[in-house]
Image: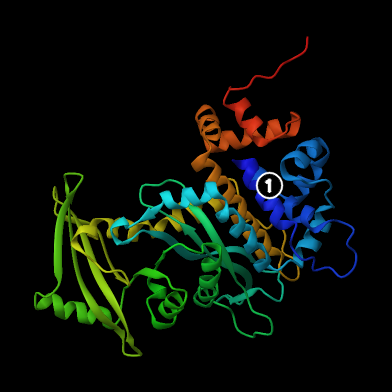
Amino acid sequence: MFDYLVSKVHETVGQMADHRKTDRGHDLSGVVMSAFAMFSLKDPSLLAFKNNFEVRQENLEQVFKIKEVPSDNGLRKILDGVSPGSLRPCFEALYKAPEVVEVVKERQCFAALGGFVAIAADGTEHFCSNHTNCPHCLVRNLKNGEVQYYHQMVGACIVKPNEKTVLPVFAEPITRQDGATKNDCEYNAFKRLVPNMGQVLPGHKKLILLDGLFADGPAIRAIQDGQMDFITVIKEGYVLVQAARLEESGQLESFTWTKNQHFRCTAKWAHGLVLNGANQDISVNYLQYQEVDTRNGKTVYASKWVTSLEIREDIVPEFVSVARSKWKIENETFNVLKNHGYNLEHNYGHGKSFLSSVLAILMFLAFLVDQLTEATDSLFQKALMVAKTMRDLRQKVRVLFDFIPCLSMNLIYGIIARDLKLGLSP
């Protein structure tokens, strides 16, 4: 599966328009694939990737279709001019693959409502420095007088309750826009991300899972304009005032069930509430939830959401599970990218234009390929079982990739899984 997905990425990268008007000594597709390969192999830097080129040359050409690699500074210079949005077709190409279409279908939720693909979205920081900066950097003035320059992005992933793997959809940089004098923000980046999600996943009913920052008119309008549905945490506002009045008068619908023997779950909901005074034309549905440990009477979890979905008693438990899976964008996505081999917060290169954002999105793309491989490839799963941990598996992959000539990554997985044995001459 890995080799098939990489071939899709390479095919799409080969169609990218070259931003360079002169000095095209190195093929753009090879440069982009080099950065992608660096993240796939979990190399610590572009310099380390370049230094390993000679021992890997044959395998890089076979697996990643890379024939030559410029210096690490050359890679940064060329990538710096690549527009982050030009990488979106790579995500589109992967999601159009028939095998991936089936994976996405398996992750649908709310079958009783016709089936939705749940997409969690949130922002994260991936670069920060007191000195290094570019025109697109966000700027933070600290109380001690120091100035920090930083980059963030809003990422979106397909999630499903009780499903380990997440599937990255796309990421939108939170950067100072051309000619702007003020910082960009997570809110504006999300509104730019919405149409991108629509283009990456056409034909799917999309349900966007968000935190309380987005429980307002412009964000909901952007979702509606994209013909998507939403579940958003709500922590304050006129909706809660209306819900409190309905609860006092006993007009909220209610359903209670037991989970894992000791947890009493209670949901209360209402339809057709006005979002707020500034957006009286936007009608939302509301659900509040409380989970109590019956052994000690303590509340172990409680939350409140607004949604565009029709709330029915038969879907309430699933509604709560899906809404809570929003946190997979933090735990199974950003946490993994920062702390489990990808090193999202490491400065692979900053540049003067787009480099920092382009590298972050290429890492997101490599993560998508890894997640699809883990979810679908039985040989990879067997290799992981033999290696026992993902960290050990990646280390074994790098060692074999560096020293064993191979036609595909599948061959490496087969060796690690012990399905294939190396023939050693006496």
Give the colour scheme of this rendering.
Answer: rainbow
Where residue 162 appears, as percent x and y from the top left, is 36, 47
Q: Is residue 425 left or right of residue 123?
A: right
Q: How many numbered circles are shown? A: 1
Q: Amino acid at mark 1?
A: Ser
Quarter in which the N terminus is drawn? top right
Residue nearer the viewer, 1 or 216? 1
Where residue 190 appears, as percent x and y from the top left, is 51, 72
Determine the residue positioned at 66% across, 73% down.
137
Determine the residue positioned at 24% across, 79% down.
272
Residue nearer the viewer, 376 or 344? 376
Determine the residue positioned at 9% across, 78% down.
249
Q: Is residue 355 left or right of residue 107?
A: right
Residue nearer the viewer, 338 or 396? 396
Check disc 1: other Cα within 10 Å, few if <14, some if 14-19, many if 20+: some
Residue 113 seen from this side = yes
Say if 78 sits above or below 223 in the image.
Answer: above
Residue 146 seen from this side = no
Where residue 203 appears, as percent x and y from the top left, is 48, 63
Say if 196 sits above or below 331 in the image.
Answer: below
Quarter in which the C terminus is drawn? top right
Query: Would you identify the image quadrant in which residue 112 lies?
Result: bottom left
Residue tagged 1:
7
Residue nearer the viewer, 66 or 123? 66
Where residue 312 appears, as percent x and y from the top left, is 21, 64
Query: Would you identify the image quadrant in which residue 362 lies?
Result: bottom right
